[in-house]
Image: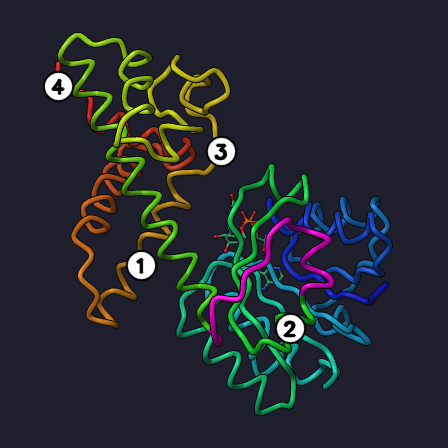
């Protein structure tokens, strides 16, 4: 068993850290939220007063933070950054979903300080974090990704190496852009069928047996009442929130500009999710994008 520092104990990081405790790791935690710290303390974590204290003696340092600026600050802030305090034999695993540039900046600073790092963003939401069934998409050397497998395996069911630093974020960005596109396309097709008088359940069955079959239709039908377990049948209670999909699409759009990638479908999906956010649906499940496609009455 290992000594692991875990920084960022929110909706995802909290249950991930709990799973590490369940298998017997020593987990030293830090978060800005006293409530989050109290919850983890009850599960047996060692609560640190600062992020720097959390990394003392840790063999792995895991971060699960909202965005690139938080990750950069936690590692590199001249006053409170932890990088200078991490053991040179330790491995940094950043599981946050952030921009590729920040990954490369932190990885280069870590390398200059003699510390190894990988990016390892996840697929699967809060339920998968709690169940320990996340998918990790890693960027970094083979040696370091292999080293990370020991602890990532305690929080997830699938671990992929996509390439070097930042490649995990690229894989996640591509996957979520495609998810946004096929969810919007599925919602559009179902709503058009309904506008023509079709039963969305019958149309779903037809498309599932035809070439329109896709993951959104198979397990996450966006039309209310078609699939009992889908968020659409529970007033779009998330699930995966509109605001998180929009965050991922914004990262994809930024990256497409930086790399000259042509993403007309992703860009169109982003506009739909942006409109859904602007009507106050940020906290609804992302399949609620169907509401943007209902004809004006
Ligand atoms: P969250 O807002 O619930 O949690 C973030 C935590 O980070 C909070 O507890 C906050 O207090 C803490 N934090 C912020 N700045 C800090 C600092 N400087 N030092 C210590 N703690 C700090 O977010 P979340 O839903 O857990 O998401 C975390 C990451 O995982 C994000 O990058 C998100 O995009 C990604 N993600 C989320 C989901 C999901 O369904 N929620 C799914 C996949 C990936």
Q: Nearer the viewer, residue 189 or 283?
A: 189
Check disc 4 and report the residue beneath it: 296
Q: Nearer the viewer, residue 206 or 268?
A: 206
Tell me the distance, in whole angstroms, between the alpha carbons under discs 2 and 3: 29 Å
Check disc 3 and report the residue beneath it: 239
Tell me the distance, in whole angstroms, between the alpha carbons under discs 4 and 1: 30 Å
Mark 1 in CB contact with mark 2 (< 8 angstroms): no
Tell me the distance, in whole angstroms, between the alpha carbons under discs 1 and 2: 24 Å
**Magenta region, residue range:** 149-165
Tell me the distance, in whole angstroms, between the alpha carbons under discs 3 and 1: 21 Å
Number of disc labels: 4
Tell me if mark 1 has few (under 14), some (14-19) or many (20+) residues whose alpha carbon lies within 10 angstroms of its own. many
Magenta span includes 152: yes
Q: Which of marks 4 and 1 is nearer the N terminus?
A: 1
Q: Which of marks 4 and 2 is nearer the N terminus?
A: 2
Query: Where does the C terminus fall, quadrant-wise?
Result: top left
Check disc 2 and report the residue beneath it: 92
Q: Earlier in the sequence, mark 1 or mark 2?
A: 2
Query: Residue at (51%, 70%) from the top-left corner?
Result: 139
Asked whether, in this view, residue 86 is left or right of residue 160, the answer is right
Q: Earlier in the sequence, mark 3 or mark 1?
A: 3
Tell me the distance, in whole angstroms, between the alpha carbons under discs 3 and 4: 27 Å
Q: Is mark 2 on a helix, strand or loop?
A: strand
Q: Is residue 68 above or below residue 214?
A: below
Asked whether, in this view, residue 180 is left or right of residue 264, the answer is right
Tell me if mark 3 has few (under 14), some (14-19) or many (20+) residues whose alpha carbon lies within 10 angstroms of its own. some
Q: Which mark is residue 252?
A: 1
Q: Is mark 4 on a helix, strand or loop?
A: loop
């Amino acid at each position: 068993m290992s000594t692991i520092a875990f920084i960022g104990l929110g909706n995802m990081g909290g249950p991930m850290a709990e799973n590490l405790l369940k298998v017997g790791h020593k987990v030293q935690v830090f978060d800005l939220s006293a409530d989050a710290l109290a919850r983890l303390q009850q599960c047996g974590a060692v609560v640190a007063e600062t992020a720097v204290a959390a990394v003392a003696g840790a063999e792995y340092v895991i971060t699960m933070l909202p965005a690139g600026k938080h990750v950069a600050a936690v590692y590199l802030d001249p006053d409170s950054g932890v990088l200078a305090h991490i053991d040179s034999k330790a491995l940094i695993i950043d599981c946050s979903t952030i921009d590729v540039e920040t990954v490369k900046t932190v990885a280069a600073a870590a390398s200059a300080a003699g510390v190894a790092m990988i990016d390892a963003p996840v697929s699967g939401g809060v339920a998968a974090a709690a169940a320990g069934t996340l998918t990790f998409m890693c960027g970094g050397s083979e040696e370091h990704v292999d080293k990370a497998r020991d602890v990532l395996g305690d929080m997830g069911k699938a671990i992929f190496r996509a390439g070097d630093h930042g490649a995990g974020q690229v894989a996640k960005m591509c996957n979520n852009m495609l998810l946004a596109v096929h969810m919007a396309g599925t919602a559009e097709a179902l709503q058009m069928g309904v506008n023509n008088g079709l039963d969305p359940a019958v149309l779903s069955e037809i498309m599932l047996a035809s070439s329109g079959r896709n993951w959104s239709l198979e397990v996450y039908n966006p039309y209310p009442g078609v699939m009992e377990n889908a968020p659409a049948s529970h007033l779009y209670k998330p699930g995966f929130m509109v605001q998180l999909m929009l965050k991922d699409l914004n990262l994809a759009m930024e990256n497409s500009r930086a790399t000259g990638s042509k993403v007309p479908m992703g860009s169109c999906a982003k506009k739909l999710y942006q409109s859904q956010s602007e009507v106050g649906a940020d906290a609804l499940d992302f399949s609620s994008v169907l509401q943007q496609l209902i004809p004006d009455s």
